[in-house]
Image (spheres, grey):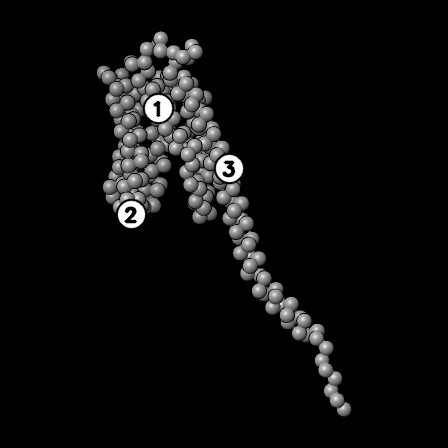
Protein backbone atom coordinates (compact mmCIF):
# COMPACT_ATOMS: atom_id res chain seq x y z
CA UNK A 1 0.00 0.00 0.00
CA UNK A 2 1.31 3.43 -0.95
CA UNK A 3 2.31 5.69 1.91
CA UNK A 4 1.05 9.07 0.71
CA UNK A 5 2.37 11.36 3.42
CA UNK A 6 2.85 15.05 2.65
CA UNK A 7 6.22 14.74 0.82
CA UNK A 8 4.95 11.82 -1.26
CA UNK A 9 1.73 13.68 -2.04
CA UNK A 10 3.73 16.63 -3.38
CA UNK A 11 5.84 14.28 -5.49
CA UNK A 12 2.75 12.52 -6.83
CA UNK A 13 1.22 15.92 -7.61
CA UNK A 14 4.26 16.69 -9.78
CA UNK A 15 3.67 13.47 -11.71
CA UNK A 16 0.05 14.48 -12.28
CA UNK A 17 1.26 17.82 -13.68
CA UNK A 18 3.03 16.08 -16.57
CA UNK A 19 -0.04 15.59 -18.84
CA UNK A 20 -1.33 19.01 -17.80
CA UNK A 21 1.91 20.63 -18.95
CA UNK A 22 1.83 18.80 -22.28
CA UNK A 23 -1.82 19.72 -22.84
CA UNK A 24 -1.19 23.43 -22.35
CA UNK A 25 1.84 23.28 -24.63
CA UNK A 26 0.38 21.24 -27.47
CA UNK A 27 -3.34 22.05 -27.45
CA UNK A 28 -4.33 25.34 -29.07
CA UNK A 29 -5.91 27.16 -26.13
CA UNK A 30 -5.80 30.87 -25.30
CA UNK A 31 -2.67 31.69 -23.26
CA UNK A 32 -1.69 28.05 -23.28
CA UNK A 33 2.00 28.95 -23.12
CA UNK A 34 1.39 31.13 -20.06
CA UNK A 35 -0.45 28.35 -18.25
CA UNK A 36 2.25 25.89 -19.32
CA UNK A 37 4.90 28.16 -17.84
CA UNK A 38 2.96 28.41 -14.57
CA UNK A 39 2.60 24.62 -14.38
CA UNK A 40 6.30 24.13 -15.15
CA UNK A 41 7.38 26.68 -12.53
CA UNK A 42 5.15 25.02 -9.91
CA UNK A 43 6.66 21.63 -10.73
CA UNK A 44 10.20 23.02 -10.62
CA UNK A 45 9.60 24.92 -7.37
CA UNK A 46 8.22 21.84 -5.64
CA UNK A 47 11.21 19.77 -6.78
CA UNK A 48 13.21 20.45 -3.62
CA UNK A 49 10.22 20.92 -1.32
CA UNK A 50 9.21 17.27 -1.08
CA UNK A 51 12.77 16.14 -0.37
CA UNK A 52 13.23 18.82 2.30
CA UNK A 53 9.95 17.90 4.03
CA UNK A 54 10.81 14.19 3.94
CA UNK A 55 14.15 14.83 5.63
CA UNK A 56 12.80 17.47 8.01
CA UNK A 57 9.97 15.33 9.36
CA UNK A 58 11.73 11.98 8.87
CA UNK A 59 9.13 10.75 6.40
CA UNK A 60 11.51 9.20 3.90
CA UNK A 61 9.91 6.18 2.22
CA UNK A 62 10.79 3.72 -0.54
CA UNK A 63 7.97 4.97 -2.77
CA UNK A 64 9.13 8.53 -2.24
CA UNK A 65 12.70 7.67 -3.18
CA UNK A 66 11.33 6.09 -6.37
CA UNK A 67 8.80 8.77 -7.33
CA UNK A 68 10.98 11.84 -6.69
CA UNK A 69 13.59 11.31 -9.44
CA UNK A 70 10.89 9.83 -11.70
CA UNK A 71 8.78 12.99 -11.40
CA UNK A 72 11.78 15.19 -12.24
CA UNK A 73 12.61 13.22 -15.36
CA UNK A 74 8.98 13.00 -16.51
CA UNK A 75 8.52 16.76 -16.25
CA UNK A 76 11.73 17.53 -18.16
CA UNK A 77 11.08 14.85 -20.78
CA UNK A 78 7.48 15.96 -21.31
CA UNK A 79 8.57 19.58 -21.76
CA UNK A 80 11.39 18.69 -24.17
CA UNK A 81 9.24 16.38 -26.31
CA UNK A 82 6.51 19.02 -26.49
CA UNK A 83 8.99 21.73 -27.47
CA UNK A 84 10.37 19.48 -30.22
CA UNK A 85 6.83 18.93 -31.49
CA UNK A 86 6.28 22.70 -31.54
CA UNK A 87 9.50 23.26 -33.47
CA UNK A 88 11.08 25.25 -30.66
CA UNK A 89 13.88 22.76 -29.97
CA UNK A 90 16.00 20.44 -32.10
CA UNK A 91 15.27 16.75 -31.58
CA UNK A 92 18.95 15.87 -31.09
CA UNK A 93 19.21 18.31 -28.18
CA UNK A 94 16.26 16.68 -26.46
CA UNK A 95 17.76 13.26 -27.16
CA UNK A 96 21.07 14.16 -25.50
CA UNK A 97 19.30 15.35 -22.35
CA UNK A 98 16.91 12.39 -22.19
CA UNK A 99 19.69 9.85 -22.87
CA UNK A 100 21.77 11.32 -20.04
CA UNK A 101 18.86 11.10 -17.62
CA UNK A 102 18.14 7.48 -18.55
CA UNK A 103 21.81 6.49 -18.28
CA UNK A 104 22.21 8.06 -14.85
CA UNK A 105 18.93 6.53 -13.67
CA UNK A 106 20.10 3.10 -14.77
CA UNK A 107 23.42 3.56 -12.99
CA UNK A 108 21.66 4.72 -9.85
CA UNK A 109 19.47 1.60 -9.89
CA UNK A 110 22.54 -0.64 -10.22
CA UNK A 111 24.22 1.22 -7.36
CA UNK A 112 21.11 0.77 -5.21
CA UNK A 113 21.15 -2.98 -5.82
CA UNK A 114 24.80 -3.05 -4.77
CA UNK A 115 23.89 -0.94 -1.70
CA UNK A 116 26.13 1.90 -2.86
CA UNK A 117 25.33 5.57 -2.35
CA UNK A 118 26.56 7.99 -5.02
CA UNK A 119 25.96 11.50 -3.68
CA UNK A 120 24.72 14.26 -5.96
CA UNK A 121 27.41 16.69 -7.03
CA UNK A 122 27.36 20.41 -7.71
CA UNK A 123 27.42 19.63 -11.41
CA UNK A 124 24.14 17.75 -11.08
CA UNK A 125 22.47 20.63 -9.28
CA UNK A 126 23.79 23.11 -11.86
CA UNK A 127 22.48 20.85 -14.63
CA UNK A 128 19.00 20.82 -13.10
CA UNK A 129 18.96 24.62 -12.78
CA UNK A 130 20.12 25.06 -16.38
CA UNK A 131 17.41 22.71 -17.64
CA UNK A 132 14.70 24.62 -15.81
CA UNK A 133 15.94 27.97 -17.14
CA UNK A 134 16.30 26.77 -20.72
CA UNK A 135 12.89 25.08 -20.81
CA UNK A 136 11.16 28.10 -19.24
CA UNK A 137 12.84 30.41 -21.77
CA UNK A 138 11.77 28.19 -24.68
CA UNK A 139 8.18 28.18 -23.44
CA UNK A 140 7.94 31.96 -23.19
CA UNK A 141 10.12 32.82 -26.20
CA UNK A 142 7.36 33.11 -28.83
CA UNK A 143 5.33 35.51 -26.68
CA UNK A 144 7.76 37.56 -24.60
CA UNK A 145 11.31 37.30 -25.99
CA UNK A 146 11.75 39.67 -28.91
CA UNK A 147 13.75 38.46 -31.94
CA UNK A 148 16.06 41.50 -31.73
CA UNK A 149 17.22 40.47 -28.26
CA UNK A 150 20.41 38.81 -29.42
CA UNK A 151 24.05 38.53 -28.42
CA UNK A 152 26.60 37.82 -31.10
CA UNK A 153 23.77 37.07 -33.50
CA UNK A 154 22.32 34.39 -31.22
CA UNK A 155 19.16 34.58 -29.15
CA UNK A 156 19.06 34.38 -25.36
CA UNK A 157 17.46 30.95 -25.52
CA UNK A 158 20.28 29.69 -27.78
CA UNK A 159 22.81 30.40 -25.04
CA UNK A 160 20.59 28.87 -22.37
CA UNK A 161 20.13 25.69 -24.42
CA UNK A 162 23.89 25.56 -25.01
CA UNK A 163 24.50 25.90 -21.27
CA UNK A 164 21.97 23.14 -20.62
CA UNK A 165 23.72 20.84 -23.09
CA UNK A 166 27.19 21.46 -21.67
CA UNK A 167 26.12 20.93 -18.05
CA UNK A 168 24.06 17.87 -19.00
CA UNK A 169 27.08 16.17 -20.57
CA UNK A 170 29.58 17.31 -17.92
CA UNK A 171 27.36 16.28 -15.00
CA UNK A 172 26.73 12.90 -16.62
CA UNK A 173 30.46 12.24 -17.06
CA UNK A 174 31.10 13.44 -13.51
CA UNK A 175 28.45 11.07 -12.13
CA UNK A 176 29.93 8.06 -13.93
CA UNK A 177 33.46 8.97 -12.79
CA UNK A 178 32.31 9.20 -9.16
CA UNK A 179 30.46 5.91 -9.53
CA UNK A 180 33.62 4.22 -10.83
CA UNK A 181 35.63 5.62 -7.93
CA UNK A 182 33.00 4.43 -5.48
CA UNK A 183 33.10 0.93 -6.94
CA UNK A 184 36.90 0.86 -6.67
CA UNK A 185 36.72 2.00 -3.05
CA UNK A 186 34.22 -0.75 -2.23
CA UNK A 187 36.40 -3.36 -3.93
CA UNK A 188 39.48 -2.18 -2.02
CA UNK A 189 37.57 -2.20 1.27
CA UNK A 190 36.36 -5.73 0.58
CA UNK A 191 39.89 -6.88 -0.24
CA UNK A 192 41.26 -5.30 2.94
CA UNK A 193 38.55 -6.95 5.02
CA UNK A 194 39.27 -10.32 3.43
CA UNK A 195 42.99 -9.97 4.08
CA UNK A 196 42.35 -8.93 7.68
CA UNK A 197 40.14 -11.97 8.18
CA UNK A 198 42.72 -14.35 6.73
CA UNK A 199 45.74 -12.95 8.58
CA UNK A 200 44.98 -14.45 12.06
CA UNK A 201 44.21 -17.82 10.51
CA UNK A 202 47.44 -17.78 8.51
CA UNK A 203 49.40 -16.82 11.63
CA UNK A 204 47.83 -19.66 13.57
CA UNK A 205 48.66 -22.13 10.80
CA UNK A 206 52.28 -21.00 10.72
CA UNK A 207 52.56 -21.29 14.53
CA UNK A 208 51.10 -24.78 14.42
CA UNK A 209 53.49 -25.85 11.69
CA UNK A 210 56.50 -24.55 13.57
CA UNK A 211 55.42 -26.38 16.71
CA UNK A 212 55.07 -29.63 14.78
CA UNK A 213 58.52 -29.28 13.19
CA UNK A 214 60.35 -28.42 16.43
CA UNK A 215 62.85 -31.19 17.41
CA UNK A 216 61.79 -33.34 20.31
CA UNK A 217 64.29 -33.82 23.17
CA UNK A 218 65.86 -37.26 23.26
CA UNK A 219 64.88 -39.49 26.12
CA UNK A 220 67.71 -40.47 28.49
CA UNK A 221 68.44 -44.10 28.74
Distance between the Cα atoms at labels 3 and 1? 26 Å
Q: Quadrant of residue 205?
A: bottom right
Side (left or right) of 124 relative to 206: left
Mark 3 lies on a secondary structure that is: helix
Question: For this rendering, which residue is in front, 123 or 102?
Answer: 123
Provide the residue designation for mark 3. 177
Residue 102 appears in the picture as rendered: no
Q: Which residue is nearer to you in this view: 107 or 202?
A: 202
Q: Is residue 186 above or below residue 215?
A: above
The quarter of the picture where residue 210 lies is bottom right
3D distance between C-alphas at marks 1 and 2? 31 Å
Asked whether disc 2 touches disc 3, contact meaning CB atoms under 8 Å apart, the reply is: no
- Rounded to the nearest angstrom, the CA distance separating label 2 from label 3 is 31 Å
Residue that lies at the very extreme toward the right in this rendered image: 221
- Name which residue lies at 27% across and 41% down: 53
Mark before the other along the chain sequence, 3 or 1: 1
Q: Is residue 23 above or below residue 203?
A: above
The residue at which mark 1 appears reads as 133
Residue 115 locus on image (x, y percent): 44, 48
Quarter that holds the C terminus: bottom right
- In the picture, the disc for residue 193 is none
Q: Residue at x 26, y 37 (%)?
A: 10
Label drawn at residue 58: 2
Left or right relative to 159: residue 188: right
Label located before the other in sequence (2 or 3): 2
Can you tell which quarter of the image residue 87 is in?
top left
Q: Residue at x 57, y 64 (%)?
A: 200
Amino acid sequence: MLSLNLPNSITFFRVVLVPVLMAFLLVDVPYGDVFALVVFVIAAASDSLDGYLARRFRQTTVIGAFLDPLADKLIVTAALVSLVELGELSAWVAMVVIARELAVTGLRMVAAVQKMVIPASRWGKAKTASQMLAIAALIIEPRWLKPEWTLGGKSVTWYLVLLMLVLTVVSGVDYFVHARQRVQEDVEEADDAAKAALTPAAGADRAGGQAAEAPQPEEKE
